[in-house]
Amino acid sequence: MMRYSLIFFFLFSFSFSWAKPIRFRAVLRQDPSQSISIGWEQVSGKAPVLYYGPKDLGQKAKAYPLKQIPQKSYQVKGMLTYFARLANLQPNTNYYFVVCDEEGCGQRYSFKTLPSSPKERLSIVAGGDSRNYQAARINANRLVARLHPHLVVFDGDMTALGTPKQWQGWLDDWQETITPEGRITAMVVARGNHELSNETLYKLFDLPNPKAYYALSLGGNLMRLYTLNSMMPAAGLQADWLAEDLAAHQDHAWRFAQYHHPMRPHVKRKSEKEELAKAWAPLFERYGVQLALECDSHTSKYTWPIRYSQEQGHEEGFIRDDKNGVVYIGEGGWGAPLRNADDTKSWTRAAGKLNQVKWLFVSLENIEIRTVKSDNASLIGFLDDDSRFSMPKNIMLWQPQQEEHIDLANNYLLRYQPPTDKAKTALMELSAKAEQQRLRLFWACKYEGHNYRFLIQHSHNKIYWSTLAELEGAGPSEELPNHYEFADIQQRPLSQQSYYRISVLDEDGELLDRQELLVKASQENEERIPLLSVNLLRKHLPINLALHKAEEAVRFELFDVNRNSQRRYKMALGAGRQEVQLNIQGLKAGDYLLEISYDGRLEKRAIRLYIP
């Protein structure tokens, strides 16, 4: 009997073998709404592959629609580290993944891409200095799992000496930031003085620049996040890069910088960093950096908005300026030995000694800044996507002067410009209604930019077109389109049928999109069904539907001119107005008929696919 039990045990173990990827982390290095880098240590097993997709399929690796072989691997700090850089992701979307190798598959994890729209708020946990005290470090890590932020901004000094043992321990502790359901929060890291080289961070966190300074845009152009390296010369190449990037991103609503050494520490034993202040502070003020995270001193602080100046009333080269100043927050407290905040200034808003992280809520109009005490992290409730801007159960906030948070208003909104992606600019909802000798045209356009205009044209034969009018656009739009109307007062006889064409042009006159509409004289009092012209290079056909109720089976079938079926689609759709994207890759240019059926109804759309 014992022999059969052993045989069963070995068969069971073989059938459910596990891969050995450990010490996971997620890193942001390009557009966080469309990409992420997943890193792990491979303890054993060869040829690892990351399988992923937007649906949770557990550990059924082959069922996931996407896979990525790691593009980077390093032997660093006693660990064989792999990074799989995932791209072409959908914004604001949950993805699930497993890592498999020749020995099997590991645990299922997940992450969520950042939103791409600046109209959506971001939640950010920020801080640094986690060396020495493991219990305090683990508590701060647990806050990440519970507060459910979009990302973590980590400002350096992970370990004390940077030994392999310490780094392995740090990454083990970082697993506490992962929720019980396996959700990983991505991070953006800076170098501190206890990171002995740029190379260590570059290889452990897949940094986009081996010099460990770089910038990322968050939430479209909601925020430009700058990671600077205070362990390299602040002036020269780094300052030149910073000035150039700041100048190029003035259309962002916020500019936020992180770097390790504070310009003016709030602990006496720490020296002033005049080289940082001289090289960076004037650039911050010239180009509208509103917030800076500093660490290193192992204490907590908020400043009032301050400006680098030697004018009367300054202290240590800074003076309060509520209109043009920068707010500096910090200065560590993720697990390093705490120090008394014994060097406050006239422009210090608050300072204190506590284990803590900063928690930011970022919107177009303001940033709410909170300091969360970490000592009771295991008692704090878990937030989720729907509640991430709420206060969880048992949270302990630092409240100097009885302020639960400080509210940083955006003084630079005039610089902000809503993003425009010309590849997304699209005409939609083109229709017409005849009223005696007047024909009214209706259309909408989303993802407009500044100074766009519309060309309205008419033709009897689609060969010769006459221009009726050129209208100025209403200005920038995103998912919610701008709506337009034009009345054609007809001084010509109404022919049996005629055509109208709407073109959207950018500020340089470049054609971005065009749609045509067939109008028949015999149907002059009916609303017209549009002829939808679509650029084949877009690869997707946008179809607008208005459903009175949710439908489990909406069927789309696309026919060519000979009534041969070319594509079939079926999907469940919710109630209300919505846009459906149909894949048209592989189709040829030409005319098609799209039939849409649901709940006993049949709608038809004339489709023209063209290549410009």
Image (cartoon, rainbow, N blue to C red):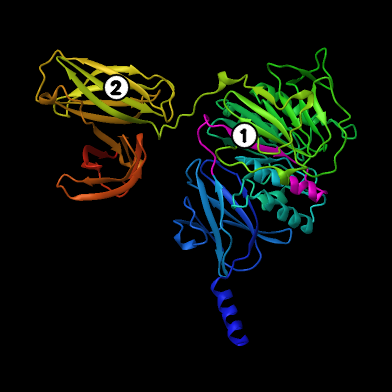
Q: Position of residue 487 (x, y in %)?
A: 24, 16
User: Residue under circle 2?
Assistant: 455
Instruction: Report if residue 121 lies within the magenta region.
Output: yes
Q: Is residue 568 left or right of residue 102?
A: left
Observer-nearest of 612 and 134: 134
Question: What is the span of residues highlighted in magenta in the rendered image?
Answer: 113-139
Identify the mark nearer the N-term, 2 or 1. Answer: 1
User: Looking at the image, is 138 positioned above or below residue 472?
Assistant: below
Q: Position of residue 467 (x, y in %)?
A: 23, 19
Q: Is residue 530 left or right of residue 247?
A: left
SS at circle 2? strand
Which amino acid, by three-letter code, is at mark 2?
Leu
Kindly identify the residue that appears in the image at 37 percent across and 20 percent down: 473
Observer-nearest of 184 and 592: 184
User: Residue 457 is drawn in which quadrant?
Assistant: top left
User: Looking at the image, is 583 positioned above or below residue 407?
Assistant: below
Q: Which mark is residue 582?
A: none
User: Residue under circle 1?
Assistant: 390
Q: Is residue 74 left or right of residue 341?
A: left
Observer-nearest of 415 and 67: 67
User: Residue 290 is drawn in which quadrant?
Assistant: top right
Whether residue 591 can be seen here: no
Whether residue 353 can be seen here: yes
Kindly identify the residue that appears in the image at 39 percent across and 22 percent down: 452
Q: Residues under labels 2 and 1: Cα distance?
A: 48 Å
Kindly identify the residue that appears in the image at 58 percent across and 37 percent down: 387
